[in-house]
Amino acid sequence: MDNTFSQWKKQCLNKMDQSKKGSVDQDIEHVVSLLNSREEFFTTSSCSGRTILIDGAPESGGVQKQNCTWLFVSHQKCTSEDLMSGLEKSSGDAVLKFEPFVLHVQCRRLEDAQLMHSVAVNSGFRNSGLTVGKTGKIITAVRSTHGLEVPLSHEGKLLVGHEYVNFLTQTANQKMEENLRRIHRFYQNLQAALITEKLQKLQLPDPSDSQEPQHPPDRLETEKEEKDKTSVYFFGLFTTDIFVNAGQLVTGSLAPYFLSVCQPNYTALSCQDTAHFVSQSDACTGDPNDIMRARKTFPSKEAALSLYTAVYLAMYVMSCIGTSGGRLTGPLLSLSLVSLAVLTGTNRVAEYRNHWSDIIAGQVIGGAIAVFLVVFVVQYFKKRPLIPHSPSDAGTSNTDEASPQTDHTMETSGKDNAAQSPGSCTEVT
């Protein structure tokens, strides 16, 4: 089959270009050259896209390229004056048409055709398709549907005014611009696909070398797991804060420094009734915000959050990193984190900001939440083995699954110039 394909390619590229123009359009020369330089492809016909004005016979039921006159044709932008000059030559039914880029490529294997089809669809040519002939020829047609066809005259008489011709000119030129953008996108995607395919062939392991081929981990899956772990950490912070706030509101325990910020009015309260000293609103003369903070110290929020963070990070280091950085690195780092959290609580007692009971209660809450999340949640985020792909899956990522239109049959349209390097397989237009 490979020898037959090589013969077909040689015969096609050696034929004379029999299109009306007689050469490959300038805007797609680089595309045609790239394809013909590859051993898996060669082009059979092409057209970069064109604006044409055709004059057909009045009695014909439809506009045909046979038995008609081309009043004007351009593969670039045109002007309304160009169209009006062509319409002056009309003696039948003149029709303005914009025909977008079209390319027919014969492929060596079905996988090559599928790759070409995927590139075409992803580049905006969603009407592309491929066919397999009786002789084994596999052809991919790259094409789109953003065309234009408007009748302008009948029996040589103009049916529209100059203003409408100007509008059609602008519309055709806009379609030409979009057409050129799609060609550029197709060329870039084709280059990338061919390079990727070449790298895959170079790096594809021999299945006989290993019964269990190793595959690199999915980077996106790893990033998702890291985001999940971060989300769990912040969820734990939020939960710890809620538990601590609830405990402080319920207990209303006073801080050791409460009297210094309260600055009680002993004269107004009378020293005989000390029970009203704490609860009565006018008992204190200090700053209300400081007084409110001094009334809510059990359990200690600082102790809870610091130990939660330390325990969570310490357990994460030990469970997910382990001894990969050295036998003592993980335990030393974990011990340092927990020690700093404990020292934070001890320091608050030494500075008379909290009682020992406040610190112990806060650390119990923070540590318990951290242990629960790491043991029952984070462990599920540890690296899971990926499902191995069979070697037969290689090279099929850009196949007909990219578009439901793979089964489109190719129409051998007569609107195509022959696409060959320098002149390709012939197609009479």
Image (cartoon, rainbow, N blue to C red):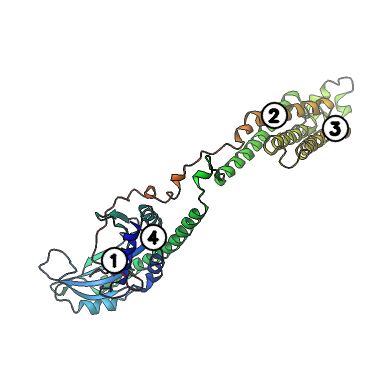
Q: Earlier in the sequence, mark 2 or mark 1?
A: 1
Above or below: residue 414 compared with residue 353 = below
* Nearer to us: label 3 or label 4: 4
Q: Earlier in the sequence, mark 1 or mark 4?
A: 4
Q: Of 297 and 418, which appears nearest the observer?
A: 418
The residue identified by callout 4 is 40
Circle 3 crowding by C-alpha within 10 Å: few under 14, some 14–19, many from 20: some
Res 278 quadrant in image:
top right
Determine whether, in the image, residue 19 is placed left or right of residue 114: left
The residue identified by callout 2 is 371
Question: Does the image show residue 255?
Answer: yes
The x and y percentages for residue 249 are 72, 27
Res 314 quadrant in image:
top right
Q: Earlier in the sequence, mark 4 or mark 2?
A: 4
* Nearer to us: label 1 or label 4: 4
Hey, what amino acid is under mark 2? Val
Determine whether, in the image, residue 308 is placed left or right of residue 421: right
Residue for point 80% across, 26% down = 360
Task: Tell me the number on the disc at residue 346.
Answer: 3
Spatial CA distance of label 2 from label 1 is 68 Å
Spatial CA distance of label 3 from label 4 is 74 Å
Hey, what amino acid is under mark 1? Glu
